[in-house]
Amino acid sequence: MSRYEPSVIEPKWQQAWDEAQAFLAKRDPSKAKYYVLEMFPYPSGRIHMGHVRNYTMGDVVARYKAAQGFSVLHPMGWDAFGMPAENAAMERGGHPKEWTYGNIADMRGQMKPLGLSIDWTREFATCDPEYYGQQQAMFLDMLEKGLVYRKNAVVNWDPVDMTVLANEQVIDGKGWRSGATVERRELTQWWRCSNCATRSMH
């Protein structure tokens, strides 16, 4: 072959990597561990070039560390929990679970042909009960130790998405996703204690 033909070369080597389990994270006491974790994408159902750029950079780091002899863990996760997914599903007339997991399947299908060194056996979504159950258990531990409390505060409220927005999500007084005029509302929220450094979780 005189030139690079992606449609021929990529499937060939990706199949070879899959068969060799080249990116499967394995416990090896003789090797130093290295953890590569990029941001979790929101499962909108479409991969864009920003995703490709982000995960290509992580892929380079993971491959470089593996070549140096590290035992690399390079998992994949999806930022799939909360109001944005529920609102999007309601807008489209479906169930949030079906909409979210359907989008994850679409995006996984778009990402796999990129040949990234991801261990897909370690994939999870933040809406998986196994994931948020651990988050809730951790929060209850913090609550029991007095590391969190509730109080009122003024927030940016998007009346269309019906959710709180960070300052960075408000553009010229409007919600970045809905375009609705943002309201200032006082809501009860959870806070971490100001003197947590002097307390112990143990």
Image (cartoon, rainbow, N blue to C red):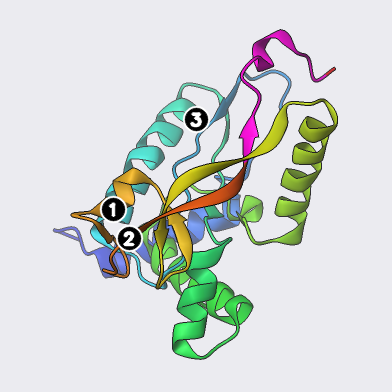
- Residue at figure coordinates x 58%, y 60% from the top left: 81
First in residue order: circle 1 vs circle 2: 1
Callout 1 touching callout 3 (CB < 8 Å)? no
- Residue name at image x 18 percent, y 54 percent: 172
* Range drawn in magenta: 190-201
Q: Is residue 105 visible?
A: no
Q: Is residue 75 above or below residue 146?
A: below
Cα distance between the residues tagged 1 and 2: 7 Å
**Residue under circle 2?**
182
Instruction: Give the secondary structure at mark 2.
Output: loop
Discs 2/3, front: 2
| Camera-nearest residue between 199 and 116 | 199
Observer-side mark, 1 or 2, equals: 2
Residue 134 x/y as whole percent: 77, 46
* Crowd class of label 2 (few under 14; some 14 to 19; many from 20; radius 10 Å): many
**Residue denoted by label 3:** 66
Q: Say which quadrant the C terminus sits in.
A: top right
Question: Is residue 124 something one can see in this rendering?
Answer: yes
**Mark 2 or mark 3: which comes first in sequence?**
3
Secondary structure of the residue carrying tag 3 is helix
Looking at the image, which is closer to me, 147 or 173? 173
Amino acid bearing label 3: Ala
The residue positioned 73% from the left and 21% from the top of the image is 29
Residue placed most toward the observer, 40 or 171: 171
Q: Quadrant of residue 6?
A: bottom left
Which residue lies at the image location 73% right of the left edge and 26% below the top edge? 147
